[in-house]
């Protein structure tokens, strides 16, 4: 039986009278990158800490490749790598010393430890910096170091909490490529970020949380289909605008045709093939189509549609 990389089921976590996480459920598949998004205080970090066995749920359960955080926490830790949003390091510690310390903490010995150190150094590009003090590293290189530490025991599932926070554009792109490479290896990844434009080109699916509850989960396309069954299309033609409007209103799936800017906008309910027939109809009708643009939607649109700005 093939297990999900991560299975979160009805997880609830309370701090006194305050419910930080309320019956949260979602999945991450092997090789899939899932974006975990929500406003500050939504419950993202609490959920991630429960999945990483750092906090215990009051109700529900989390499984990593079928192992329960409640029943088999040691097995979960063996299969999981957790990169927190902030981490500390001892003063006057070199990159090699830092990684060697964690390799020993993971019970890596002899040739196995050396192979792990060589691998993460090469993968993250830190090999030339082994002798450098951590205090002298840039923010981007420190994030790579934390990722390298997270990968030492070759986990099958990764939790990355705000890994791109504070990075410059080049460092964010480089980190994104590393995460993609990890997913290509078959590792499941749960990643949180406030930089939604970065996640848009990275994730396969998303889980949106607000007020401790999941507001939507699935691929961006699936969620958008539920939120907006109609797609909005703008068209501009050389022909008479009234004639274009007459040609549109009789077509299947077209509704809400109205004047907008120098052209027309309309709602379309149907698949991309049907929309291509709408375009073909206008072209064959001699209306001189110069612009035909379905409205683009992104992760920010999904986030704003699903959340209401609730602060806990």
Image: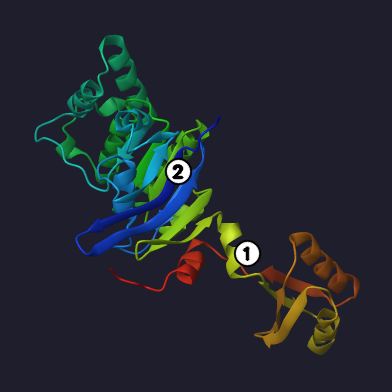
Question: In which quarter of the view is residue 159 placed?
Answer: top left
| Secondary structure under the numbered disc 1 in the rendered image | helix
Q: Which residue is mark 2?
A: 7
Is mark 2 in CB contact (under 8 Å) with mark 1?
no
Percent of width and height locating residue 232:
66, 74
| Image location of residue 134, percent across then percent down | 18, 35
Q: Check the picture and name the quadrant holding the N terminus.
A: top right
> At 66% from the left edge and 85% from the top edge, which residue is drawn?
260
Element under disc 2: strand
Q: Is residue 167 visible?
A: no
**Which residue is painted at 25% across and 13% down in the image?**
109
Classify residue 92 by image quadrant: top left
Along the horizontal axis of the image, is 148 left or right of 94? right
Q: Residue furthest left?
A: 91
Identify which residue, 225 or 176, lies in the foreground: 225
- Of the pair 90 and 80, the residue shown nearer to us: 80
The numbered mark at residue 126 is none
- Position of 19 with respect to 175 (left or right) is left
Residue at 24% across / 43% down in the picture?
A: 138
The residue beneath circle 1 is 225
């Amino acid at each position: 039986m093939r297990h999900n990389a991560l299975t979160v089921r009805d997880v609830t976590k309370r701090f006194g009278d305050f419910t930080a996480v309320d019956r949260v459920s979602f999945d991450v598949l092997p090789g899939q990158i899932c974006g975990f998004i929500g406003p500050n205080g939504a419950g993202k970090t609490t959920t991630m800490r429960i999945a990483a066995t750092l906090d215990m749920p009051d109700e529900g359960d989390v499984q990593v490749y079928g192992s329960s955080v409640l029943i088999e926490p040691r097995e979960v830790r063996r299969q999981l790598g957790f990169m927190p949003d902030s981490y500390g390091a001892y003063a006057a510690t070199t990159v090699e010393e830092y990684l060697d310390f964690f390799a020993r903490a993971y019970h890596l010995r002899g040739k196995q430890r050396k192979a792990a150190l060589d691998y993460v150094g090469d993968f993250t590009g830190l090999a030339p910096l082994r002798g450098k003090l951590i205090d002298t590293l840039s923010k981007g290189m420190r994030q790579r170091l934390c990722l390298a530490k997270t990968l030492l025991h070759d986990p099958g599932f990764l939790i990355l909490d705000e890994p791109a926070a504070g990075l410059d554009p080049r460092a964010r792109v480089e980190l994104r490529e590393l995460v993609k490479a990890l997913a290509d290896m078959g590792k499941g990844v749960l990643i949180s970020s406030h930089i939604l434009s970065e996640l848009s080109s990275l994730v396969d699916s998303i889980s949106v949380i607000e007020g401790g509850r999941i507001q939507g989960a699935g691929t961006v396309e699936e969620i958008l289909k539920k939120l907006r069954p109609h797609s909005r299309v703008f068209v501009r033609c050389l022909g008479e605008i009234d004639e274009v409007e007459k040609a549109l209103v009789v077509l299947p799936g077209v509704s809400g045709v109205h004047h907008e800017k120098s052209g027309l906008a309309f709602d379309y309910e149907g698949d991309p093939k049907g929309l291509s027939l709408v375009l073909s109809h206008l072209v064959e009708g001699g209306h001189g189509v110069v612009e035909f643009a379905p409205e683009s939607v992104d992760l920010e649109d999904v986030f704003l549609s699903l959340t209401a700005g609730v602060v806990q």
